[in-house]
Every structure is written in C-alpha cells, then in structure tokens.
Image: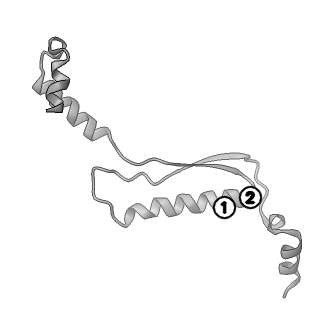
Amino acid sequence: MTQHIQNMLVNGIEQWAPILSVRKAVVDFSSPNIAKEMHVGHLRSTIMGDTLARMLEFSNVEVLRRNHVGDWGTQFGMLIKYLFEQFPNWEDAGDQAIGDLQV
C-alpha cells in the first residue's frame, strides 16, 4: 500500500479535499416537465446535480439539494385561457364557476 493511501486511511480523506471559499451552496437539479413523458434524458440533470453536490460536500461545503419537478406554466396558461373562454363574465359568475369546474 502506498504512503498516500496509508495517510488517507489513518488521517482521513478530508486532507485531500480542496479548500473552497464557499461555505454553503444550493444545487437545483432534475426539473422534468410533468406534462410530458419521462425519458432517459431526464436522468442527465439528476446525475449531474448529484455529482456536483457530492463534490461540494467532499470539499466540506454545506449543500442544500433542491429538486423541482415540473414546468407548470403551459398547463396553467391553458387553464386560465379555458376559464376566460367559458366564463367571459367571470366577475358575475360567483361561486357557480368553481362548482362547474368540479362537475
């Protein structure tokens, strides 16, 4: 066993981690569009984000992992458009408009 490996095993792996000026980082990854079918391409962002988070943690950086799922913009835009078409006088509809959506 080489001297470097013996030192690492005895003294800990921290001695090999680079010292970064960053103490805390946010890693945001994996944002698939839930309105579309999942595929292997969605794994790319997840793997890259996890790798980056692990590298930062190895360098003693506190990592906040954030995983956002979905791109809701189009879906909500279509819903709003539908509501305006179905209820052009929506201010006069009152609670009935909500009841119609539930039916």
Amino acid type of the residue that numbered disc 1 sits on in the rendered structure: Met
The residue that mark 2 highlights is 59
Q: Is residue 48 left or right of residue 82?
A: right
What residue appears at the point 41 percent right and 49 percent down from the top-left corner? 69
Q: Which mark is residue 99?
A: none
Q: Residue furthest top?
A: 92
Amino acid type of the residue that numbered disc 2 sits on in the rendered structure: Ser
What residue appears at the point 28 percent right and 50 percent down from the top-left corner? 35
Residues packed near mark 2 inside 10 Å, few (<14), some (14 to 19) or many (20 plus): some
Residue 77: percent from left, percent from top = 25, 34
Residue 80: percent from left, percent from top = 22, 29
Front-lying residue, 21 or 99: 99
Q: Are marks 2 and 1 in contact (CB under 8 Å)?
A: yes
Q: Is residue 51 left or right of residue 94?
A: right
Front-lying residue, 102 or 42: 102
Front-lying residue, 43 or 103: 103
What residue appears at the point 84 percent right and 74 percent down from the top-left corner? 8
The residue that mark 1 highlights is 55
Q: Quadrant of residue 2?
A: bottom right
Give the spatial CA distance, label 2 vs label 1.
6 Å
In this rendering, is residue 13 above or below 57? below
Q: Secondary structure at mark 1?
A: helix
In this rendering, is residue 12 above or below 92? below
Residues packed near mark 1 inside 10 Å, few (<14), some (14 to 19) or many (20 plus): some
Quarter placement of the C terminus: top left
Residue 51: percent from left, percent from top = 58, 63
Q: Secondary structure at mark 2?
A: loop
Residue 28: percent from left, percent from top = 52, 49
Quarter placement of the N terminus: bottom right
